[in-house]
């Protein structure tokens, strides 16, 4: 790609970003419109527009003459010249999504990981990337976005700890950059999920959004006007380790009574394995366990939705704690919307209703009056799409020759 050799100085780069974002946000706009809106000269905008067109990020569309004089040719974002690759890990499985420049998922891919340790996780990712690169309908932006479990240092791309999996210091970025030769951008998987819902799903156009991902672990994304809050060192949103009961069960982090230990998919599995308090006729969840089938948090939700009373009891106990955590977020952060996602959070009812009910018991009335609590709308690809956003956000630098911005 010859345009990759183009190096831009800082002013040029800033102006190019502004022109591109003007076209993305403002829809079809002529060079003259863009110049006026950004306060740049028409020559500058024309030079930048020419470069963006040659790079395949922007295209010209049919001018609407409207019967008056010579119209400016409108510019628009091109959908099919470049694609972005994102991946997310859940329950021993990598989920890959290829998106167009508008964030539409055009291809997907899955890869089951061998074992439960970080080696199989890294091997599965490297192999999956190689496979999905062959499935892309067009050229991929030269980078990979990854939604990883645990607390991720986004600068080094290291998973510092994933307490639900018992991992420490997994050098994700270094390993995958070494194998693929591509720049790799890493984010916690639920932060990636929150980014995707904020841009394309249930959080679109929402000012204050909190996305709560519930799977084998629990984590959240705090998003304000589409911008993800990282915190001082990338742990903003780690609500899984908020202490709910100091005398509660031991968490993987070494403390007792974390939300994760009381309300995650892992906690649901533990409750299911402990069995019901009283003796009665065996319900569907108990039968599944008695048959030796491996149980998951999603399975507990599914059996609760089917009316199994023991599964519903497990889910109600977890939702009681989730509801308190959600109420505390409502009281302190005053969000417009809270979106539940992740493999367990995505299951909808009865979890959603239970969390709404519990949150309403404990939150302060004033912020409770405006907040909406819903389930995410993007389904299985949420986190992979959010990870692809890390690549889409850098498309200008990736195409025009600077790989990290
Ligand atoms: Zn913990």
Image (cartoon, rainbow, N blue to C red):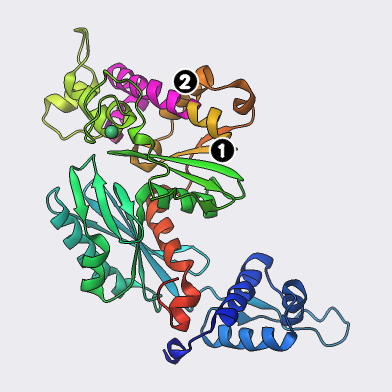
Residue situated furthest right in the rendering: 68
Q: Quadrant of the N terminus?
A: bottom left
Indicate yes or no whether the magenta region holds residue 307: yes
Instruction: Name the residue at 61% across, 28% down.
Output: 367
Q: Quadrant of ligand 1?
A: top left
Q: What is the magenta segment's predominant secondary structure? A: helix
Can see residue 350? no
Say which element carries label 1. strand
Who comes first in sequence, dot 2 or dot 1?
1
Q: Quadrant of residue 99?
A: bottom left
| Residue carrying label 2 | 358
Say which element carries label 2. helix
Q: Does the residue tagged 2 have its C-beta within 8 Å of any atom of ligand 1?
A: no
Q: Quadrant of residue 45?
A: bottom right
Instruction: Name the residue at 18% across, 54% down.
Output: 113
Q: Quadrant of residue 262?
A: top left
**Image coords of residue 163 (percent x, y):** 23, 40
- In the picture, the disc for residue 337 is 1
- Mark 2 is surrounded, within 10 Å at the Cα level, by few (under 14), some (14 to 19) or many (20 or more) other residues, namely many
Magenta part of the protein: which range?
Answer: 298-327
């Amino acid at each position: 790609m010859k345009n990759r050799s183009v190096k831009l100085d800082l002013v040029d780069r800033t102006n190019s970003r502004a022109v591109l974002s003007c076209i993305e946000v403002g829809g079809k706009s002529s060079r003259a419109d863009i110049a006026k809106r950004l306060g740049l000269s028409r020559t500058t905008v024309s030079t930048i527009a020419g470069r963006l067109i040659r790079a395949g990020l922007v295209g010209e569309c049919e001018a609407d003459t409207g019967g008056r004089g010579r119209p400016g040719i409108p510019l628009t974002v091109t959908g099919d010249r470049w694609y972005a690759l994102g991946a997310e890990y859940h329950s021993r499985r990598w989920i890959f999504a290829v998106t167009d420049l508008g964030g539409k998922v055009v291809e997907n891919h899955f890869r089951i990981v061998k074992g439960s340790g970080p080696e199989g996780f890294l091997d599965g990712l490297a192999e999956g990337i190689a496979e999905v690169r062959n499935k892309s309908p067009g050229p991929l932006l030269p980078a990979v976005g990854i939604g990883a479990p645990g607390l991720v240092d986004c600068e080094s791309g290291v998973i510092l700890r994933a307490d639900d999996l018992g991992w420490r210091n997994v050098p994700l970025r270094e390993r995958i950059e070494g194998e693929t030769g591509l720049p790799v951008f890493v984010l916690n998987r639920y932060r990636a999920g929150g980014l995707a819902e904020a841009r394309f799903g249930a959080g679109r156009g929402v000012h204050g959004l909190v996305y709560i991902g519930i799977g084998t672990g629990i984590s959240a994304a705090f998003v304000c006007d589409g911008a993800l809050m990282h915190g001082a060192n990338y742990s903003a949103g780690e609500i899984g380790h908020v202490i709910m009961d100091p005398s509660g069960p031991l968490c993987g982090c070494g403390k007792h009574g974390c939300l994760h230990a009381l309300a995650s998919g892992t906690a649901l599995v533990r409750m299911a394995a402990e069995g019901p308090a009283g003796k009665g006729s065996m319900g569907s969840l108990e039968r599944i366990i008695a048959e030796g089938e491996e149980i998951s948090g999603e399975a507990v939700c599914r059996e609760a939705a089917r009316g199994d009373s023991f599964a519903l009891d497990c889910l109600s106990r977890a939702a009681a704690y989730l509801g308190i955590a959600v109420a505390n977020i409502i009281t302190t952060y005053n969000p417009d919307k809270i979106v539940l996602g992740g493999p367990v959070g995505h299951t909808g009812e009865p979890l959603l209703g239970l969390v709404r009910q519990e949150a309403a018991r404990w939150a302060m009335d004033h912020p409770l009056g405006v907040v909406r609590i819903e389930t995410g709308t993007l389904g299985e690809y949420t986190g992979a799409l959010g990870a692809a956003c890390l690549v889409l956000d850098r498309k200008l630098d990736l195409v025009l020759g600077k790989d990290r911005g």
